[in-house]
Image: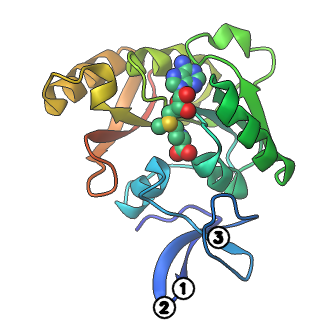
Amino acid sequence: MNLTEGVEEREFDGRQRLATCGEAVYGEPVEDGWRAWDPHRSKVGAMIEKGMDLGLPDEPTVLYLGAASGTTVSHVADFSGPTYAVEFAPRPVRDLVGVAEDRRNLFPLLKDARKPETYAHVVERDVDAVIQDVATRGQADVALGNREFLADDGRLLAAVKARSEDVTRDPGDVFSDVLDRLSEGYEVLETERLEPYHEDHLAVVARPRI
Ligand code: SAM
C-alpha cells in the first residue's frame, strides 16, 4: 500500500484498516482519534488500498468535485490543507456543511463542476490535486474544464464510472474513450479498475500536459 502523509493503517476490532485522524462522519469506527476509512464507500480509499501512487505532497491543497454528503472528502480534508468541495445537489450539501463545521479547512461549494467559471473566484489556483468523483456523463470534460486550477506538477485523481457515460456499452470501451479525451489535457500516469470495491469504475492518476 502506498500511504500518503496523514493516512495510516490502524487496528480496528483486530483488523488492520486505512484510517485518518478526525471527527467521525458516517458511523465509522474511531480509535484514539483515528477513524476507519472504508474503501467500499470511497473511491480514493479504494485507490490507496489498491496501491496506486497518488503523488500528493504533505498537506495538499485540494479541489474535490462531486463531494456528495462528505464521506470521502471528510477523510481527504483530515490530511489536507484547504479543501474546496464542489457538489451541485442541495440535499447532500446540507450534510456537507455539517461535516465542514468540524473541519476548518473544508469549504463546501454548491456549484456545478461543469461550470468552473462560477467558482473560479473562490477556489485558489495551483492546487496540488483535483479529485473527481462526479458519476455523470462527460467525466473527461469535467476534468478538462477544471484543469486550470491544478498546479503544473499537480495530480488529477479521477474515478470514472462507466455506466454514467453509457449503460449499454462495454465498460472497457467507455474507459478507452474517456482516456483518449482526457489525454487532450492530461498525461495519464496510472489507471486501475476499482473492483472489488466499486464495480465498473476506473481510477485514473494523471498530471496536466503543459
Ligand atoms: N465522492 C463522494 C464520496 O465518495 O463521498 C460520492 C460522490 S457520488 C458517486 C457523485 C456525486 O457527484 C453526486 O453527489 C452528484 O450529485 C455529484 N455530481 C454529479 N454531477 C455533478 C456536477 N456536474 N457538479 C457537481 N456535482 C456533481
In the displayed structure image, the side of residue 169 where residue 44 appears, left or right: right
Q: How far apart in space, not on screen, are marks 2 and 3 (Cα)?
A: 15 Å
What is the tally of numbered marks visible in this picture? 3
Q: At x 44% / y 22%, what residue is drawn?
A: 209
In the displayed structure image, the side of residue 10 where residue 40 appears, left or right: left
Q: At x 79% / y 36%, what residue is drawn?
A: 107
Circle 1 is placed at which residue position? 11
Q: How far apart in space, not on screen, are marks 2 and 1 (Cα)?
A: 6 Å
**Disc with the residue nearer the chain's start (1 vs 3):** 1
Q: Quadrant of residue 10?
A: bottom right
Tell me the kind of residue under disc 3. Answer: Arg
Q: Is residue 108 above or below residue 177?
A: below
Q: Is mark 1 within 8 Å of ligand 1?
A: no
Task: Point out the residue furthest to the front here.
Answer: 91
Label 3 residue SS: strand
Label 1 Cα crowd, 10 Å radius (few <14 / some 14-19 / many 20+) = some
For the residues bearing labels 1 and 3, Cβ distance under 8 angstroms:
no
Label 2 residue SS: loop
**Disc with the residue nearer the chain's start (2 vs 3):** 2
Circle 2 is placed at which residue position? 14
Q: At x 69% / y 26%, what residue is drawn?
A: 90
Q: Is residue 38 above or below residue 83?
A: below
Label 3 Cα crowd, 10 Å radius (few <14 / some 14-19 / many 20+) = many
Q: How far apart in space, not on screen, are marks 1 and 3 (Cα)?
A: 10 Å
Tell me the kind of residue under disc 1. Answer: Glu
Q: Position of residue 54 (x, y in %)?
A: 47, 50
Q: Quadrant of residue 46?
A: bottom left
Circle 3 is placed at which residue position? 35
Q: Is mark 3 within 8 Å of ligand 1?
A: no
Tell me the kind of residue under disc 2. Answer: Gly
